[in-house]
Image (spheres, helix red, strand yellow):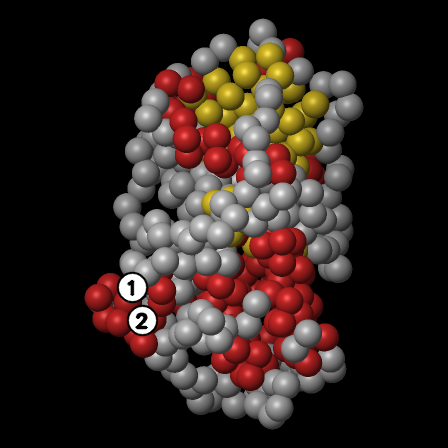
């Protein structure tokens, strides 16, 4: 039943390294570190989220929520929590390893990219988020950085990661905690009004917008002005970037308008969005928009901005060492991992909570730049 989530029991281990061979650090967060590891029994590669229990003092409720949410989820487009261990002064979340890299990387590296490609991506995200909503779970922080490819295959599925801000709704309740990433949050969150699952649908609309032009619908160097744009739902389909995007009935623009609807009561649900012709029909165009979109992604989402919490080269390096990679070569940034829930990364000198210290969160990132002519 939605909202009925029990905290999972975890296994005890005298030394986690008796079970897993730690290979490399994939990333650090405010009170966690993610390690690439190999199961000594099965030789399966996994991502282990290592959490110092002493760093959780005062945050136990948040951590229990995170684990409860992950343990409840079983969907082909959502990174899975395979196991939980307690060993010494740490908790270890054994996560599914995804090695296909980030959404923006894959788009930029493609030579051909169309509306139909974007439609297929958004279909997978909608299907996964509908599954979450049916369980009474609101993600609350959907954004391109949290969309990772399962593997390096051309037809790899997309995976949703990062459930650090997710919340299981109690039946009949409304959420009110202001959270999420500026630029992707719904107007009602910024207005500090009670909100619901509709906030995720707004974020999917923002992601769809970016996938079709390469820049965000809201941008300003001044946070107050950025928030004002979002509160008013003021966005445009700017020329020339949107000139080749479908604009008739059942078009990409129509789809986005229904998701980026200011009134959450009028906003499409995931179920409604899945039935829209741009997703369920054949209105998504096959025209190549790669040059324009990839150019804007490079300009507006620099690596330093969209790669916040992990070393994206670590997995592909180990995959190649183990001859598990594909023929795709030469892109050191093409792989990622199943790191979930880590807040903003610490700096280069950030400590490792697997070595009994923890990292302070990094500074807030500035809002994205406007599209570059």
* Residue 170 pos. (x, y %): 49, 45
Looking at the image, do the residues carrying marks 1 and 2 touch, with CB atoms under 8 Å apart?
yes
* Residue labelled with disc 1: 191
Residue 21 is labelled as: none
Image vertical order of residue 85 relative to residue 266, above or below: above
Mark 1 or 2 closer to N-term? 1
* Residue 301 pos. (x, y %): 43, 62
Image vertical order of residue 241 relative to residue 295, above or below: below
Residue 335 seen in the current view = no
- The extreme top residue here reads 14
Element assignment for label 1: loop
Asked whether, in this view, residue 218 is left or right of residue 284, the answer is left
* Residue 75 pos. (x, y %): 69, 47
Image vertical order of residue 223 relative to residue 162, above or below: below
Quarter in which the N terminus is drawn? top right
Quadrant of res 28: top left
* Residue 4 pos. (x, y %): 57, 38
Asked whether, in this view, residue 216 is left or right of residue 116, the answer is left
Please tell me which residue is depicted at 69% across the width and 84% down the height of the picture.
283
* Residue labelled with disc 2: 231
Please tell me which residue is depicted at 50% across the width and 85% down the height of the picture.
242
How packed mark 2 is, by other alpha carbons closer than 10 Å (few <14, some 14-19, many 20 or more), is: some
């Amino acid at each position: 039943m939605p909202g009925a989530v029990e905290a999972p029991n975890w296994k005890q281990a005298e030394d986690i390294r008796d079970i897993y061979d730690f290979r490399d650090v994939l990333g650090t967060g405010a009170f966690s570190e993610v390690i690439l590891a190999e199961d000594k029994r099965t030789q399966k590669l996994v991502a282990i989220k290592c959490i110092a229990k002493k760093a959780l003092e005062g945050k136990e409720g948040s951590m229990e929520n995170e684990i409860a949410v992950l343990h409840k989820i079983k969907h082909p487009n959502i990174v899975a929590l395979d196991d939980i261990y307690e060993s010494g002064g740490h908790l270890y979340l054994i996560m599914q390893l995804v090695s296909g890299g980030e959404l923006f990387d894959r788009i930029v590296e493609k030579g051909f990219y169309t509306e139909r490609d974007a439609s297929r991506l958004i279909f997978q995200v909608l299907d996964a988020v509908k599954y979450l909503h049916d369980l009474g779970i609101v993600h609350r922080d959907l954004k391109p950085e949290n969309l990772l490819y399962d593997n390096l295959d051309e037809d790899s599925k997309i995976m949703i990661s990062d459930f650090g801000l997710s919340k299981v709704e109690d039946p009949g309740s409304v959420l009110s905690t202001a959270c999420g990433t500026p630029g992707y949050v719904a107007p009602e969150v910024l207005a500090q009004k009670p909100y619901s699952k509709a906030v995720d649908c707004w974020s999917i609309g923002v992601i769809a917008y970016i996938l079709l032009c390469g820049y965000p619908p809201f941008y300003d160097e001044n946070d107050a002005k950025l928030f004002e744009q979002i509160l008013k739902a003021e966005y445009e389909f700017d020329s020339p970037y949107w000139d080749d995007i479908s604009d008739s009935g059942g078009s990409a623009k129509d789809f986005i308008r229904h998701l980026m609807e200011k009134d959450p009561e009028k906003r499409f649900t995931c179920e409604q969005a899945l039935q829209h012709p741009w997703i369920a029909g054949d209105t998504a165009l096959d025209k190549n928009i790669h040059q324009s979109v990839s150019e804007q992604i490079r300009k507006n989402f620099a690596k330093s901005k969209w790669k916040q919490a992990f070393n994206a080269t670590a997995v592909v390096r180990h995959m190649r060492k183990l001859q598990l990679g594909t023929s795709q070569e030469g892109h050191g940034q093409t792989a990622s991992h199943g790191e979930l829930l880590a807040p903003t990364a610490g700096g280069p000198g950030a400590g490792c909570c697997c070595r009994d210290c923890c990292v302070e969160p990094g500074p807030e990132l500035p809002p994205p730049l406007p599209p570059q002519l």
